[in-house]
Image (cartoon, helix red, strand yellow):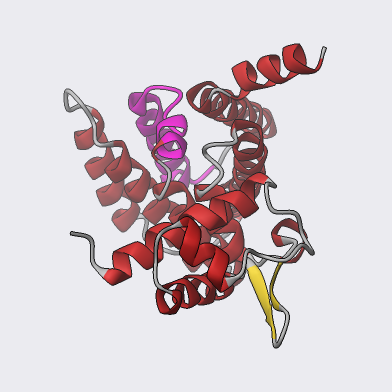
């Protein structure tokens, strides 16, 4: 038998998915405590807890004597709302794909900026800790079935070290939030390895070699790296679209409305 807290969480998530999918429109009234209790066969006290949970999620606003109204979570929500919204959007592939593309674009900007800044900066930091993490990444990538969650966590840690060394505290905070969003969604983790983990290792090894050299990269090498980095992220987005069925869903929608 499920505990009360499990019921509250599960039903709150089910209602939040309706908000995420647009079934409940911004500004509309949320179903009342009585309606939630009746639909899910619950007592009213539990239904009240569920609506309170949705308010804590940032998906509804409470109004005394009126009930709960749906928030425009896309326009008004912060990072925590975006994170929960992304996780709950997997049943609506087009929305999930759009949100993931935004996540990847933000991640790309932070990571590329950190890599280029660290490469150019005369920071004097010893890259030995970075090399230890790269060694760990390589050992894991060489296993028969690499744990992608662990791979992503190691790479996230590598970039976190870079932004910390550069004093980019705001970028680090956003990066941490992005990491949490991705790690909660299996399809997102899978998509970040649209190319072989071995290629990830090769990139990090190449960067480490540049950091240890006295001459640094040439402008043409930097331009090539930026192009390759952009191509990689395009593959990540395409892989996610494939995993969640965004293209197929869009085709079905076009057929249905034709």
Can you give x and y, in whole percent of width and height, for residue 224 in the image? Answer: 64, 26
Residue sitting at 68 percent across and 75 percent down? 61
Q: Nearer the viewer, residue 157 or 49?
A: 49
Task: Kindly tell me whether residue 163 is visible in this rendering.
Answer: no
The reply to whether the magenta stretch includes residue 193 is: yes
Quadrant containing the N terminus is: bottom left
Quadrant position of residue 79: bottom right
Residue sitting at 60 percent across and 41 percent down? 100
Q: Nearer the viewer, residue 98 or 225?
A: 98
208 to 223, vertically: above or below = below
> In the image, is 66 to the left or to the right of 167?
right
In magenta, the rendered stretch is 187-215
251 to 75, vertically: above or below = above
Can you give x and y, in whole percent of width and height, for residue 225 in the image? Answer: 60, 31
Can you give x and y, in whole percent of width and height, for residue 161 in the image? Answer: 42, 61
Q: Main secondary structure of the magenta part?
A: helix
Task: Kindly tell me whether residue 52 is visible in this rendering.
Answer: yes
Q: Nearer the viewer, residue 177 or 112?
A: 177
35 to 21, vertically: above or below = below
Residue sitting at 31 percent across and 43 percent down? 149
Residue sitting at 62 percent across and 34 percent down? 97
Q: How many marks?
A: 0
Quadrant containing the C terminus is: top right
Can you give x and y, in whole percent of width and height, for residue 168 in the image? Answer: 58, 68
> In the image, is 81 to the left or to the right of 39?
right
The reply to whether the magenta stretch includes residue 110 is: no
Q: Nearer the viewer, residue 82 or 105?
A: 82
Quadrant position of residue 112: top right
Quadrant position of residue 189: top left
Q: Residue furthest bottom?
A: 64
134 to 79, vertically: above or below = above
């Amino acid at each position: 038998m499920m505990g009360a807290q499990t019921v509250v969480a599960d039903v709150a998530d089910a209602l939040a998915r309706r908000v995420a999918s647009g079934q409940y429109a911004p500004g509309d009234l949320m179903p009342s405590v009585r309606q939630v209790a009746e639909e899910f066969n619950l007592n009213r006290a539990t239904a009240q807890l569920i609506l309170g949970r949705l308010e804590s999620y940032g998906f509804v606003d409470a109004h005394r004597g009126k009930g709960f109204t749906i928030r425009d979570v896309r326009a008004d929500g912060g990072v925590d709302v975006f994170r929960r919204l992304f996780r709950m959007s997997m049943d609506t592939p087009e929305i999930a794909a759009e949100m993931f593309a935004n996540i990847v674009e933000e991640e790309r900007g932070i990571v590329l900026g950190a890599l280029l800044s660290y490469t150019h900066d005369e920071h004097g930091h010893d890259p030995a800790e970075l090399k230890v993490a790269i060694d760990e990444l390589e050992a894991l990538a060489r296993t028969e079935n690499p744990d992608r969650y662990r791979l992503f966590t190691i790479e996230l840690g590598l970039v976190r070290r870079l932004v910390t060394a550069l004093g980019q505290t705001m970028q680090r905070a956003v990066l941490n939030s992005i990491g949490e969003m991705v790690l909660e969604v299996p399809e997102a983790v899978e998509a970040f390895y649209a190319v072989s983990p071995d290629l990830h290792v090769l990139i990090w090894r190449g960067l480490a070699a540049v950091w240890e050299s006295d001459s640094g990269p040439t402008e043409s090498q930097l331009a090539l790296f930026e192009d390759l980095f952009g191509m990689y992220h395009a593959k990540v987005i395409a892989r996610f679209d494939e995993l969640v069925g965004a293209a197929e869903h869009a085709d079905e929608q076009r057929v249905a409305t034709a």
